[in-house]
Every structure is written in C-alpha cells, then in structure tokens.
Amino acid sequence: EAGVTQSPTHLIKTRGQQATLRCSPISGHTSVYWYQQALGLGLQFLLWYDEGEERNRGNFPPRFSGRQFPNYSSELNVNALELEDSALYLCASSPDRVSTGELFFGEGSRLTVL
Amino acid sequence: KQEVTQIPAALSVPEGENLVLNCSFTDSAIYNLQWFRQDPGKGLTSLLLIQSSQREQTSGRLNASLDKSSGRSTLYIAASQPGDSATYLCAVDDYKLSFGAGTTVTVRA
C-alpha cells in the first residue's frame, strides 16, 4: 500500500513568489494535515482538511492557504514568500475524522526561499 | 494553549543501554498521544499511539506509558542499537496534534 506522497521534494523560490506543495494521502484516508518544520524548531501545525473542508488552522498568516480535492489530495499554497518560510513542510493523513487519530507522514517538501 | 515539553533535548548512550525519553503536556484533555521517530531531513514514522483511556502500549523493544492526569508520557527503548539513533517526538492530540521539540538520541557502537 502506498504511503503519503508529497511533491516536489525540493523547491527553491525567491522572496515575494508563490509556492504550491502537493500531498496525496494514503488510500482511504480522508483527513490531511500540514505542518511546518523550520530549522531548529519543532513541528508547527498549519492546516487540517477533512472531506474537502478546512477543519482547523494553526497560528499562521492568511498567505498560508490550501485546499483538499474530491480525491482527498491536498495543496498547500504560500503566497508572498518570506525568507523565514524556508522549512520542511510535512503532510500527514489519518483515517480518523473525529480526532487526529494515528498520523502517517510523507517525506516532506523542502522549501528554500532566497 | 497546549504546551508539550520533551526532556532531555539530547541523549547519548552506549549500545545496549536502555533509553528513557520523557514527554509532558499542560492540558490533560487529550484524545491520544503519539510517539514518532524522525531521521535527519526525513518525514516522521509513527512508533506508538496511546489512546487517552490506555495506560501503555508496547511494540517490540518499545514501550510507552501515559499518565494523563499528571500530563506525562514516557517512551522506553530497551537494549538500544545504533540504528535507534534519531530524533524522537511526542505529540498530543487535542483536536490538533501538538508536538514537542523532540529528543535527539545517539547510540554509540
């Protein structure tokens, strides 16, 4: 069974540009979570999508947004990139709709903002 | 706001020694607690999930306990091996997963 897949693996952008990161959950999982892991910092919760709707959002500015498609895959968009947005962005999926449940993570997309 | 703390931040032990990793959290109203392993630059691998009604979970050499009332969990790794070298993260689920900063473990051969 395929795990959570993320693309691209690496992405290099310049300040002010937009970045789009993609995530495909494990088959049968309806919930997708996005986390940011900046260098030297812990994982920070970004967004939670379930059944196409945003269920919860972390303490990030509105230029971080996303969506979930009917096939449960998800996109994370970061507009007006800033240097401090450089981080590993991790996507996770879960079959549980009530609580987070057991999370399964992808390998991440490393975003570098120059 | 849930605060998750992991102590120690780093740990170095000789091969064969048992590892004890601690995790504390401030709000005991949680659904579950999960332990993860992260290798450098990689994603997270789930190790153990403890539901709020459970006291412990075991998988092979790993054992995790949960004392929800005191806001604590401990991950025990028996007979450590160099392959256990990684960062171990605990996360509590209170409608979103809140992570600790992790404990970086080095097992010396």
Image (tube, coloured by chain):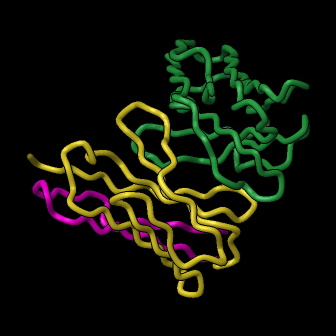
Chain colours: A green, B yellow
Query: Residue at the spot x=64%, y=79% of the render?
Result: B28
Q: Is residue B85 magenta?
A: no
In-front residue for pair A111/B37: B37
In which quadrant will I find the N terminus of chain A? top right
Name the spot of residue A21 as percent of width and height, x first: 67, 21
Q: Position of residue A87 (x, y in %)?
A: 51, 31
Q: Residue at x 90, y 34 (%)?
A: A52
Q: Is residue A5 left or right of residue B21?
A: right
A76 w.r.t. B65: above or below: above
In the shown orientation, is residue B74 left or right of residue B34? Answer: left
Q: Would you identify the image quadrant in which residue B27 lies?
A: bottom right
Counting from the top left corner in percent of width and height, residue A96 is at: 77, 51
Quarter of image, res B62: bottom left
Q: Is residue A71 above or below residue B75?
A: above
Of residues A21 and A13, the one drawn nearer to the viewer in this rendering: A21
Range drawn in magenta? B1-27
Residues A62 and A26: in front is A26
Residue that lies at the very extreme toward the bottom in this rendered image: B69
Q: Position of residue B50 (x, y in %)?
A: 58, 67
